[in-house]
Image: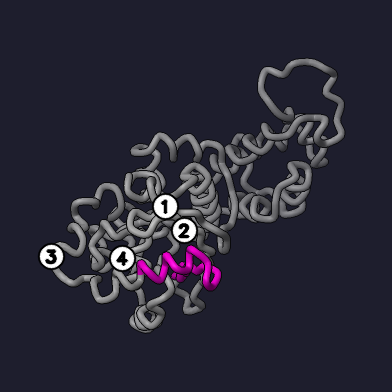
Amino acid sequence: MDTPTALGEFLRTRRAQLQPEDVGLPSHGTRRRVPGLRREELALLAGVSITYYTHLEQGQSTNASDSVLDALARALRLTPDEHAHLLNLARPPRAKRSASPRPEYARDTTRRLIAAMPQVPAVVLDGRNNVLAWNPLGHALLAGHLDFASPDDPAVRPNLTRMLFLDPHTRELYTDWKSEARVALAALRLVAGRNPEDRALAELIGSLMLQSPDFATLWSKHPVRDCTVGTKTLHHPVVGPLTLDFENLHLTDGTNHRMLLYSAPESSPSDAALRMLSSLTAGSAGAGPGSAKPASADADAGGGGAER
């Protein structure tokens, strides 16, 4: 990701979302050629010169102080996540991108942990949303049409973001796909801002920009939002409607891996549906031919996108 360019795009999109009256400025009743605040209005609100702000938005200045960035965040009424993203974009990359990112694997202890939770859908992800491991219920919930062993092969390893935008099975899984796509992309934006030197992540984003018009349209709007907890509404092809709470638990071992866990209130219809799915999939993961179609059949849609 070109950090100065991304910074300028982010500032422009947020400037376009505010009207003069939103921030206590007169609108003078004139129609604007472009929506939102003018550069000079934002510069006035932030207490910087119009020349300095223009250079910042055009990527010609890369040494903005935290105080200036904080002032811009206040003027633009950024959320805490957006404010953090602004600071990340304004900082130079910490290191050059690696020419050949090495595939990652879930630790054996993490695999044992999720295997010991048969009633909880669990997925282990890296920072790019590559699936490193899942337990049988996590696999059955999100990707029963893929090979259970596919996370072990980097060449066909599923990626949840690729699946969301390119895999028709995953698209049909979410009751409100557009909302899910917005949230997922906003979280990816935040990760990209934190890791501008990550070549594999940049390649994933570039690939999705080319392959998915929906992704390209949403990406251009520069949404930013952390997504660690929440609720998802699904329509599973086997057990029907599900409303599930989810949590992302980040491991503290320095791997940047996390566990994505799903749950439902006890005795709720969704809890009953999860238990039914668990009973249907018990002992079936990797059971042999016919349990799932080969991962290679879905490689273009779900796998291999962030490590090639």
User: Residue 262: percent from the left, percent from the top?
Assistant: 48, 67
Discs 2, 3 touching: Cβ within 8 Å: no
Which of 223 and 148 lies nearest the eye of the viewer? Answer: 148
For the point 77% across and 36% down, the residue is 43
Mark-to-mark CA distance, 1 and 2: 6 Å
Residue extent of the magenta highlight: 256-277
* Three-letter amino acid code at the position of disc 3: Pro
Mark nearer the N terminus (1 vs 2): 1
Q: Which residue is tagged 3?
A: 289
Mark nearer the N terminus (3 vs 4): 4
Which of 120 and 14 lies nearest the eye of the viewer? Answer: 120
User: Residue 259: percent from the left, percent from the top?
Assistant: 45, 71
Discs 1, 2 touching: Cβ within 8 Å: yes
Dot 4: element: loop
Mark nearer the N terminus (4 vs 2): 4
Kindly tell me whether residue 59 is visible in this rendering.
Answer: no
